Image (cartoon, rainbow, N blue to C red):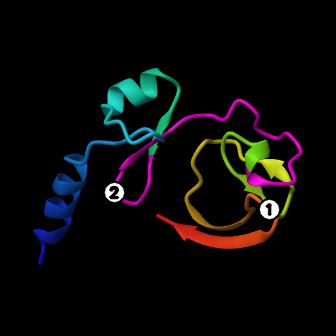
């Protein structure tokens, strides 16, 4: 089993990250554009959100996510982990995303 971690890391490095609209992008290009590679397998290129910290009451108020706890737009256009957000109607919804 000593070989398991290196194999997993090697396979994870082969995953091509995707932009929010589903377009493939290289890791270097993602970082060069100001983003960061996120997700459990490094499958997403997450960019800073232009409206980060802005007050919100529903999903359409933000380019990223309207965070339920603070009622502000997320700092990035993609949020990973477990969190609550406001949906299109302003209802609080919980989600875990990896």
Q: Which residue is mark 1?
A: 89
Identify the disc placed on residue 80. Answer: none
Residue 77: x and y, percent? 60, 42
> Mark 1 packing: few (<14 Cα in 10 Å), some, or many (20+)?
few
Badge 2: few (under 14), some or many (20 or more) residues near its Cα, within 10 Å? some
Element class at badge 1: loop
Q: Judge by depth and name the residue closer to the eye, 23 or 75.
A: 23
Label 2, on which residue? 41
Camera-near label (2 vs 1) is 1
The x and y percentages for residue 82 are 61, 70
Quarter of the image with the N terminus is bottom left
The spot of residue 25 in percent (x, y) is: 33, 32
Q: Which residue is pictured at 23% across the width and 47% down the height?
A: 13
Q: Is residue 89 above or below residue 92?
A: above
Which residue sits furthest top?
32
Question: In the drawing, does residue 42 fall left or right of residue 2?
Answer: right
Magenta-highlighted residues: 38-59
Residue at (44, 55) in percent of width and height: 39
Picture quarter containing residue 75? Answer: top right
For residue 19, what is the image quadrant?
top left
Spot occupied by residue 4 in the image (x, y as percentages of width and height): 15, 70
Most distant residue in the bottom direction: 1
Main secondary structure of the magenta stretch: loop
Q: Which label's residue is closer to the chain start, 2 or 1?
A: 2
Circle count: 2
């Amino acid at each position: 089993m000593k070989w398991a971690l290196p194999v997993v890391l090697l396979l994870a490095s082969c995953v091509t990250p995707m932009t929010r609209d589903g377009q493939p992008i290289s890791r270097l290009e993602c970082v060069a554009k100001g983003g960061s590679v996120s997700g459990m397998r490094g499958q997403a290129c997450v960019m800073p959100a232009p409206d980060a910290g802005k007050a919100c009451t529903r999903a359409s108020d933000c380019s990223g996510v309207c965070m339920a706890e603070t009622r502000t737009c997320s700092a990035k256009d993609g949020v990973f982990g477990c969190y609550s957000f406001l949906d299109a109607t302003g209802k609080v919804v919980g989600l875990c995303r990896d």
